[in-house]
Image: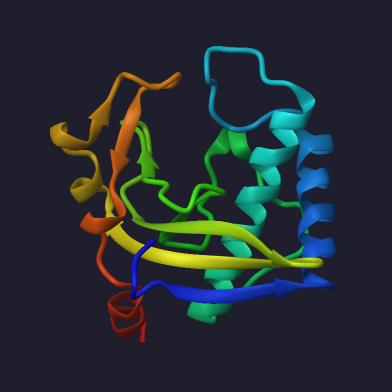
């Protein structure tokens, strides 16, 4: 985890609302937006969606971007997460920013999530990069179940720089 990460504490009612939105997305679309080439269990699909919603909300909150609790997310059309910003979340503190060849050109933000108390999750916004700085040969990994670009946290720009650019 980066020492300059931005931390957003998520508690109820936000946790409950994020969970409900993730469940609505699953009910509406039934699967994650990316074809991973394997059958995912219901628990795995639920986990992927919950992490995604929490990470998107925390990023919108920090950047003071509009956020909707409506289930208008359409994964097959590859809607943008927050306008010109794509958010990638993980529950691994040492997680990488995962991108793919078919991602939209955008600014990508990495958010790591950790349970830090009873009904409390801390979202740590680790940093950001534009897609063209993520999808580099040195970041390509094939030793994982779903080959992808895995940009390490150390390669990311600090979140405070994105805040300055966006204002």
User: In this image, 64 relative to 96: left or right?
Assistant: right
In the rendered view, tell whether residue 9 sits above or below residue 34: below
At x 84% / y 62%, what residue is drawn? Answer: 16
Answer yes or no: is residue 117 visible. yes
Q: Is residue 140 above or below residue 120?
A: above
Count of numbered marks: 0
User: Which colour assignment does the render follow?
Assistant: rainbow
| Residue beneath the point at 34% across and 75% down | 4
Report the residue that reaches farthest toward the left: 137
The residue lying toward the viewer, choosing from 162 and 72, is 162
In the rendered image, the quadrant that contains the N terminus is bottom left
Q: Which corner quadrant of the image does residue 99 belong to?
A: top left
Near-viewer residue (92 or 111): 92
Residue drawn at 82 percent across, 63 percent down: 17
Q: Position of residue 72 (x, y in %)?
A: 72, 52
Is residue 65 visible in this depiction of the protein? no
Residue 76: x and y in percent read 59, 32
The part of the image, by quadrant, that contains residue 34 is top right
- Residue toward you, 71 or 9: 9
Residue drawn where x is 34% and y is 54% of the image = 106
8 lies left or right of 53: left
Eyeballing the image, is 133 above or below 13?
above
In front of the other: 164 or 2: 2
Image quadrant holding the C terminus, namely bottom left
Q: Position of residue 93 (x, y in %)?
A: 47, 53
- Rendered image quadrant of residue 158: bottom left
Residue 163, given in percent of the width and then of the height, sits at 36, 81
Of all residues shown, which one is farthest toward the front?
117
């Amino acid at each position: 985890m980066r020492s300059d990460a931005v931390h957003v504490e998520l508690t109820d009612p936000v946790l409950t609302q994020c969970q409900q939105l993730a469940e609505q997305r699953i009910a509406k679309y039934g699967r994650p937006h990316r074809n991973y080439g394997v059958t995912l269990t219901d628990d795995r699909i639920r986990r992927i969606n919950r992490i995604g919603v929490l990470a998107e909300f925390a990023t919108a909150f920090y950047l003071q971007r509009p956020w909707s609790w409506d289930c208008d997310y359409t994964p097959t059309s590859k809607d943008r997460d927050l306008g010109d910003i794509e958010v990638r979340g993980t529950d691994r503190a040492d997680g990488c920013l995962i991108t793919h060849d078919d991602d939209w050109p955008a600014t990508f933000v990495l958010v790591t999530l950790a349970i830090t108390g009873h009904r409390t999750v801390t979202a740590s916004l680790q940093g950001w990069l534009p897609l063209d700085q993520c999808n580099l040969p040195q970041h390509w990994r094939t030793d994982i179940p779903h080959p992808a670009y895995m940009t390490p946290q150390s390669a990311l720009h600090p979140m405070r720089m994105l805040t300055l650019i966006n204002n």
